[in-house]
Image (spheres, rainbow, N blue to C red):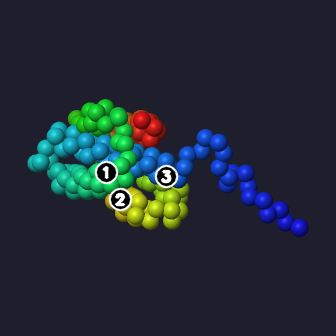
Amino acid sequence: MSDTKPRLSDQPIPGDRSRMEETERMVRVDHAGEFGAVRIYAGQRAILGENHPKAELLRHMHDQEKVHLAKFDQIINERNVRPTIMAPLWDIAGFALGATTALMGEKAAMACTQAVEEVIDEHYESQRAKLKDQDPELEDVIETFQAEEVEHKRIAEENGAEEAVGYPVLSATIKAGCRAAIWISKRV
């Protein structure tokens, strides 16, 4: 005789968020993340300039992030999801991160991109696992954008990200900051 009772971990418990609440958090944090990415590239481009040898790569990634943000602007409005109240801070912090890493040199800027995109790849993968065919529209958007974020990570690696001075510390610090921003943006 087999035990057919559902596992406790599969059952909701008091305090669990509804599927709608979870999806709203996903939209809010993804909107915030794409906004932050746009600001990081804006900071890098402001320092490195349009005549820098990596200017075209940065423009390409920046333009893709702008498309991501526009789509999440649309989704946040269509679904009436409250954006994070942290946007003014992410505006400044994103630009400052981009500008600071660019001031450290193009390899540091690429290390920044690699670190951010690694965290975002993991984040999007986690969201896709949670959605599991529950919201095909959002899943498709996340899957498409995740592929582009992985492309950005690959570009950064191919352009010397790991050769940046202090790479291990720089990368770990940026990843920790990204994870903190994700945690905060889901909630406020």
Residue 8 visible to the viewer: yes
Instruction: Give the percent coordinates (x, y) of residue 65.
Output: 27, 52
Residue at the limit of the structure toward the right, as seen here: 1
Q: Residue at x 61, y 41 (%)?
A: 15
Q: Earlier in the sequence, mark 3 or mark 2?
A: 3
Residue picked out by circle 1: 77
Of badges 3 and 2, the one in the foreground is: 3
Task: Name the mark on residue 20.
Answer: 3
Q: Are marks 3 and 2 in contact (CB under 8 Å)?
A: no
Q: Residue at the location (46% across, 62% down)?
A: 135
Q: Is mark 3 on a helix, strand or loop?
A: helix
Location of residue 76 in the rendering, given as x and y in whole percent from the top left corner: 34, 50
Q: How far apart are marks 3 and 1 (CA)?
A: 15 Å
The quarter of the rendered structure image containing the N terminus is bottom right
The amino acid pointed to by label 2 is Phe
Q: Name the front one of labels 1 and 2.
A: 1
Quick one: 48 or 32, which is closer to the camera?
32
Question: Would you place residue 121 above or below residue 132 in this image?
Answer: above
Quadrant in the rendering for residue 141: bottom left
The CA span between labels 1 and 2 is 19 Å
In the image, 124 versus 70, the foreground residue is: 70
Asked whether the beta carbons under mark 1 and mark 2 sit within 8 Å of each other, the answer is: no
x and y percentages locating residue 178 in the rendered image = 41, 40
Residue 57 visible to an observer of this rendering: no
Q: Which of marks 3 and 1 is nearer the N terminus?
A: 3
Q: Quadrant of residue 149?
A: bottom left
